[in-house]
Image: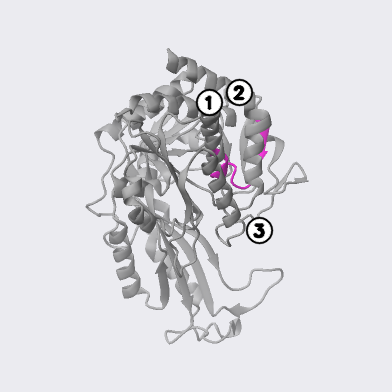
Amino acid sequence: MRDIMELNEILEKIKADFQDIHLKEIQRFIRQPSVSADGNGIIETAEMLVKKIEKLGGKDVHLADLSGDDFGHPFVYGEILSNVSKPTLLFYSMYDVQPVFPENWVYDDRKIDPFGAEIIDFEWIPGYTGKCLMGRGVCNQKGPTIAFFNVLDIYKELYGELPFNIIFALEGEEELGSTHIGPFIDEYKEKLKRAEVLLFPAFWENEIGRINMPLGVRGVVSLKLKCKGGEWGGPTIRNQHSAVSGIIQSPVFKLIECLNALKKDESNEILVPGIMDDPDIIGPDEEDEEVIQNFLKNHSFEEEMKRDGNIKIFRIDENGQELSDKDAIIEMLFKPGISINGIEGGYYGKGSMTIIPKEIKANLDIRLPPFQSRSYVIEKYSNFLDKNFPMVEYEFEKGGYEAGKIPFSHPLAQTAYSIYKEFNKEVLVLPLLAGSAPFALFQKKLDIPFLVIGIGHSGRAHSPLEYAVIESKQPEVGGIIDFELYSAMLLNKLSRDLKT
């Protein structure tokens, strides 16, 4: 009875404080840039987080910078370990964000400041509108990070302490590929492994108010390619006039040849020998198959993916048909992948410039299904490039990580799911998230489960007009306050169920 009374008090306090205190606190953090690509505002944001942890009573709070001579940014570490009989949670998130240049932040003929944290009447898909907080990082990942802190603040304010121990590991390099997360976990292993579960809070509601509940994530490796003129051919010192294209080769065409040799895009077949038939790849297991079938009983995967208009058609299969729902899920979650993120080189301005560029570069990301090894993938790609394209320089960026997941039958997954249902939400459970996230590395190195949790809709991560819903005109779509209420309910449940 006391637990119920305390939870009700917490929920009522969240509702009372949200508009005037919690929302303003999130706005304060969004207005502070923290762009990891150039370091703009990173240290200032990290120091703001240090103060928040110290205000909660955190000890050993400090910036852990393991970048050495490399370009990188610190983790914010801290811990509140008040009683060994309490369960210990590991709160992982990131405070860095993507750059905003050269994005065009304009809505309804109005220019939006990416770091203004303005409240906008916004339509995210046709027919779905409401008041939204807009700004870089509000969706990914500063918005949910600070909203989670708001809930911790409520516990501290009402009861003087938290009903659980908590370790903070807040990263400033996630948008760089989590370059130094491996060394961080290794150096702090004895501290981190005291946790019984890792929590990664996010706004997981889709555009129409359904909860996305991924049970894991794919792995990722970042690859940079560069082709320059040299002994093999092409201009060497400067760009060359295109009139001589008949007698010299072009680095641009050579890099295009290399890119086409990596993947047959129409079928998503990776052409690098050994990648598609890697024996370490574990396909959907029996429980994964059951999760997928349950998803498809009530929902169309095609509809869910295409709703926001960013996808018009899936790949075409060998029979000339668009991929079925089940085949699309398996292709997206359980097959190796590679994407070209960007290509840079030559001239693409107004008018024309008749040249053969002396250099061209490309950034790629390689997606790893369960449980393909990062080292295996790097070895196979390296061997292929060395043998077939010696004129193409390549570099695998530091960081990256492999896939991780927990079964739906895991008690923690069942706890998170049961609380979603208390909000009368449809819950879309899938074995994996299509993207990648570094918390899987904590699972591998520390052998602790993770929960990817949260309510409330947000969108346009890594894009202009990034937003999170404050109040929707459609009552089925939750906002930031619903995230805070859900988080409080989950923390209350974990503090009781995980007691040692």
Circle 2 packing at 10 Å, graded few (<14), some (14-19), many (20+), is: some
Q: Which residue is mark 3?
A: 102
Q: Is residue 419 above or below residue 362?
A: above
Nearest to N terminus: mark 3 or mark 2 = 2
Quarter that holds the C terminus: top left
Along the viewing direction, whichever of 468 and 280 lies nearer the viewer? 468
Q: Residue at x 67, y 29 (%)?
A: 19
Residue 241 percent across, percent down from the top left:
61, 84
Along the viewing direction, whichever of 311 and 104 lies nearer the viewer? 104
What's the CA distance linking mark 3 and mark 1?
36 Å
**Quadrant of res 383:** bottom left
Q: Which residue is mark 2?
A: 15
| Residue 374 can be seen, yes or no | yes
Q: Nearer the viewer, mark 3 or mark 1?
A: 1
The amino acid marked with disc number 3 is: Pro
Nearest to N terminus: mark 2 or mark 1 = 2
| Residue 479 can be seen, yes or no | no
Relative to 53, 374 lies left or right: left
Q: Nearer the viewer, mark 3 or mark 2?
A: 2
Quarter that holds the N terminus: top left
Q: Which residue is mark 1?
A: 485
Q: Which residues are magenta?
A: 127-144
The furthest residue to the left: 279
Q: Is residue 202 above or below residue 363?
A: above
Relative to 173, 117 lies left or right: right
What's the CA distance linking mark 3 and mark 2?
38 Å
